[in-house]
Amino acid sequence: MIARRTLLASALTLPFSARADEQWDAVVDPVTGTLGAALAQAERAGRPFRILLRPGIFTEKLTVRAPGITLQGSPGTVLQYGTAAGTAKPGGGSWGTGGSGTLTIAAPNVTLRGLTIRNSFDYIGARRDGAGNGAQAVALAVRREADHMIVDRCVLLGYQDSFYLQARSLITDTRIVGGVDFIFGGAAAWFERCEIVTRYVPNADGFGYVAAPSTPAAQEFGLVFSRCRLRREAGVPDGSTWLGRPWRAGGDMALTGQAAFLQCWMDAHIRREGWTWMGYKGPDGEQRRLTPPEARLCEFGNAGPGAGPAGTDRRLLTAEAAKRFTRANVIGF
């Protein structure tokens, strides 16, 4: 018993950093190492792998390819890179939206906690210089292979297309910052207690769209926001930002777009109309519009100066219909 007490006392007196190191498969300091090397180590390990990132800036463009990885940041941990859709790609061509991500998740059961992930592409400069075409610049991309994705207490920073979701995801207590379609994709995703911030862009006519769901018609749920707060940076005027627009990616007629804002608080930058249309090219090659009445865009129990009153295309759920929108129903975990 005495020996056991002595061992316990010794463990409790270890420095925090030493005890924390024992909990992790890899600990990376940006001064002495790279996250890329730690991810390669995780792939070789072939098992669940936990990585702790020390404070500092990691300037790396990375893809997580091994399942069961946890990336834990420290206060002040930033992962950044500056690639946009139109940025030239090594070997020719450009990255495209899907390839522009600072961090791309391409494996299941990955967890991100306490990280700031930033696409540092100069969006403002590109607009100023007339080089805005191909300015979609993703901070975090969750591919179709990345089922059961968890993002907790992170910060995601971009301007256009900040967060791309294509697999079931849970996002909690996370700050997501952007302007044009900055939360988008065909995933079923549950956002809880997140802060969603519209960015200020000098000389902009409007200040974008929060959500751009490309949900398959056969999929009941898409991008669902529960008890989130929709805020704005200084300079973003009242009535300047749409809740979202339905994205028919590639003109795929099977995509109708589903998004819901449930018991969220909305600042006055959200337009009274709420939702708007998005253009696409139909099977006949003609340019068309997917409108809010054709899509599945809805709200329930929201508050704040941007929450209403409901416009023609601002569909309010009944209390009974809103009961279907639970975390378990939307993502199943």
Image (cartoon, rainbow, N blue to C red):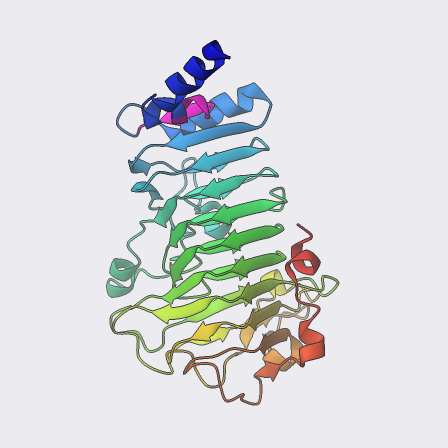
| Residue at 63 percent of width and 62 percent of height | 222
| Residue at 61 percent of width and 66 percent of height | 248
| Residue furthest to the right | 218
Residue 27 forms part of the magenta stretch: yes
| Percent coordinates x, y for residue 89 in the rendering | 41, 41
Counting every numbered tag in the picture gives: 0
Residue 196 forms part of the magenta stretch: no
Residue 251 visible within the image: yes
Judge whether 147 appears above or below 218 on screen: above
| Residue at 44 percent of width and 19 percent of height | 8
| Residue at 67 percent of width and 79 percent of height | 319
The image quarter containing residue 102 is top left
Judge whether 262 appears above or below 69 on screen: below
Residue 186 visible within the image: no
The image quarter containing residue 215 is bottom right
| Percent coordinates x, y for residue 101 in the rendering | 44, 46
User: In this rendering, would 329 be left or right of 56?
Assistant: right
Which of the pair 50/293 is nearer the observer?
50
Q: Which residues are magenta?
A: 20-29
| Residue furthest to the front | 2
